[in-house]
Amino acid sequence: MDISVIVPLFNEEESLAELHAWIKRVMDENHFTYEVIFVNDGSTDGSWGVIEQLAKQYPEVHGIKFRRNYGKSPALYCGFDAAQGDVVITMDADLQDSPDEIPELYRMITADGYDLVSGFKMNRKKGDPLSKTIPTKLFNATARKVSGIKNLHDFNCGLKAYRNEVVKNIEVYGEMHRYIPYLAKNAGFTKIGEKPVHHQKRQHGKSKFMGWNRFVNGYLDLISLWFIDSFGLKPMHIFGFIGTLIFIIGLLAVIAVGALKLWALHKGIARVLVTDTPYFYIALTMMIIGTQLFVAGFLGDMISRNSQERNNYQVSKRI
Ligand code: UDP
Ligand code: MG
């Protein structure tokens, strides 16, 4: 099979039939053998009904139905798991990504030898408000810096193409779909390219990712990934180093406080101590709590990566 198209979706009933017809047209015109896997991420509308209808009519259409809404990354994970095509293409369900890009993406993977090609939504700036474009720019700049993948402008584009081997060897979890190129790079797939793609406004329904928390979560995920990439296999190198450093500073401080006190007592000098101001305690407590939270976050992340439950999704139906 040439291509698997994976479509994660959450409440997109109005778009599915049109999207399928468009994909089918492109595939037939180019004589590809293919499958379309719709991953229904706990939709509460009629999406699953539409998928069942399509699957009945077209043997190349498959569906995976989650019992509840897990998020885009789990949906992609299950789609990747099921994909059989030599090239795997992911695409949003909302008709914002154009299936017309498929043949060129396929060519870049098979002929140019890319492991992963990410779409780049060139023409989006016109429609979007500044409140969306500025954080997106900032997000991509940071992701480029941290991941070391310098040639990507748009990490979060839903339209991407992969060599089959890539999707079988990466694990998208949590909200890591924003960083799949980074995951691929960490797994040793380094030929990562970009293709400017046509992108249009959402036709039906609303965006499923709203509000400021997507950026906060995005950055936290990036820090986690960076951490796992750098220290995941040797956490002691960082914790041990920082721990020792802080311990030595603390020890020096204790010695200094003790020595000053003894000296003052000896000389009979009465003076205001640093510890008489409340700020000393506030700063101290904050630093300790901050460090602990940070460490606890990373530990939690590493535990969750190794947990047996991490990719245990409730799939109620497959067609
Ligand atoms: N999506 C999903 N699960 C979710 C949220 C979104 O499968 O919990 C799907 C959604 O249906 C769409 C894709 O992920 O196919 C991208 O979502 P959306 O278009 O809302 O994001 P935006 O384009 O606004 O970034
Ligand atoms: Mg969208």
Image (spheres, grey):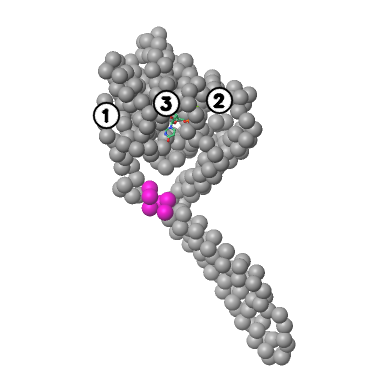
Q: How packed is label 3: few (under 14 Cα within 10 Å), some, or many (20 or more)? A: many
Percent x, y for residue 292? 50, 61
Residue, x 56% and y 74% (percent of image)?
251
Q: Nearer the viewer, residue 291 or 233?
A: 291
Percent x, y for residue 59? 27, 17
Does label 1 point to a residue whose CB lies under 8 Å from ligand 1?
no
Work out whether mark 3 precedes mark 1 in sequence or the reverse, and give the earlier one: 3
Q: Magenta part of the protein: which range?
A: 300-305
Q: Is residue 137 left or right of residue 98?
A: right
Does label 3 point to a residue whose CB lies under 8 Å from ligand 1?
yes
Question: Where, by quadrant of the figure, is residue 128 drawn?
Answer: top right
Residue, x 52% and y 36% (percent of image)?
210
Residue holding disc 2: 121
Dominant secondary structure of the magenta stretch?
helix
Residue, x 54% and y 60% (percent of image)?
290
Q: Nearer the viewer, residue 81 or 170?
A: 81
Residue holding disc 3: 12
**Residue 274 vertical placement versus 16 (above, below):** below
| Element assignment for label 2 | strand
Residue, x 61% and y 82% (percent of image)?
258
Residue holding disc 1: 318
Q: How packed is label 2: few (under 14 Cα within 10 Å), some, or many (20 or more)? A: many
